[in-house]
Amino acid sequence: MDTSKVLSGKDTAVAVYASFKNRLDILSKRGIIPGLCVILVGDDPASQIYVKTKSKKLQSLGLRSKNIYLNNDVSQNELIQTINGLNQDSNYHGILVQMPLPSHIDSQLIINSIDSTKDVDGFHPENVGWLSIGEPRFIPCTPKGIMKIFKHYNIELIGKDIVVIGRSNIVGRPMSVLVSSNGEWSNGTCTICHSRTKNLEQYTRNADVVISAIGKPNYLKADMIKKGSIIIDVGINRVEAENDKGYKIIGDVDYNSVIDKVSFITPVPGGVGPMTIAMLVENTIEAAEQNIP
Ligand code: NAP
């Protein structure tokens, strides 16, 4: 494998975690331990793994971490009451409700009920608004992590043609805002594509950077991209495999097909994923820093 083309989220995350030390020391001197509480509704195994991974990371860095597990049939009101309690709890600077929620619960209503100063996911409408007017408070973790990867590898986006595939509030939409914003390390020209885009290839073939966040295994192939382009693969797709687990995780990008054509690419795993958790830690630290008198 040609590793010179690989944009490693793992390596970037190591550098990012090292940069937290000073900030954590300053907080510690003031008696502040950043704390994150995650609420998980139901017993989806993948979500349980995510939640445990997050708390292990927080604990390993000396942050406070609590997980609240609620049954799948919890009522919307009970969930809101739990959030209200955490909104008042000064031990927890960040609150995260693991998505997706069961269909009887209105996810947006739940996001709206989180105190926006504790919304470390950056999904609350107030934080979405701050981001879109160019004065970000909490930036959603996955797009924020991708911007850190660009910076870590000294990849400037200024003037580049960037195609984001996917328009979710979690990844695609905030990603398009970040890469096109008038800020340091951005100023790209962004096109956002989705499932209704006609002739999607005509956009990706002309792009300097393609960021794929659709959740379709091996979707992006060599004939869909320009030679020398930079590819960011956000997809996490579980596919059958002949190993102990019976499955493996692959991205949206057909890595073997595109590798000879790209200038840089994020692998899956080890690309965007590790940065998402690192940014959740950073947002929790930021939330705690707001409490410094
Ligand atoms: P999502 O909410 O399902 O959104 C998927 C988006 O992709 C939608 O906008 C959809 O278009 C679009 N889309 C689907 N099929 C398409 C196609 N064939 N052509 C063009 N656009 C298409 O998913 P998400 O939450 O944004 O996540 C996307 C992927 O990233 C998933 O694999 C997820 O697991 C992964 N993810 C990874 C991380 C990480 O840390 N690495 C974090 C979050 C998510 P419409 O809007 O028209 O339906």
Image: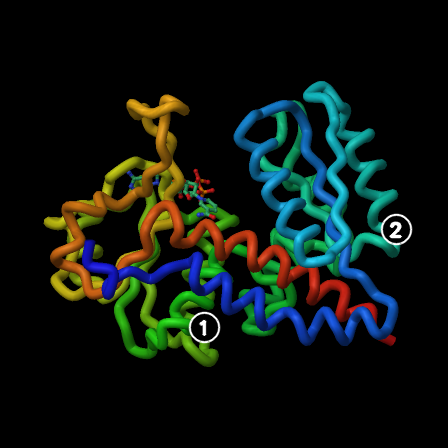
Location of residue 126 in the rendering, given as x and y in whole percent from the top left corner: 67, 59
The amino acid type of the residue labelled 2 equals Asp
Location of residue 180 in the rendering, given as x and y in whole percent from the top left corner: 40, 70
Which residue is labeled 2 in the image?
89
Residue positioned 46% across, 67% down in the render: 148
Q: Quadrant of residue 77?
A: top right
Please indicate whether residue 202 sits to the left or right of residue 125 in the image: left
Task: Point out the tag, 2 or 1, that comes first from the N-terminus.
Answer: 2
- Queried on whether the Cβ of the residue with tag 1 lies below 8 angstroms from ligand 1, the answer reads no
Q: State the mark number for residue 181.
A: 1
Location of residue 198 in the rendering, given as x and y in whole percent from the top left corner: 22, 45
Q: Quadrant of residue 160?
A: bottom left
Q: Is residue 272 above or below residue 292?
A: above
Q: Is residue 41 above or below residue 219?
A: above
The amino acid type of the residue labelled 1 equals Ser
Q: State the mark number for residue 230.
A: none
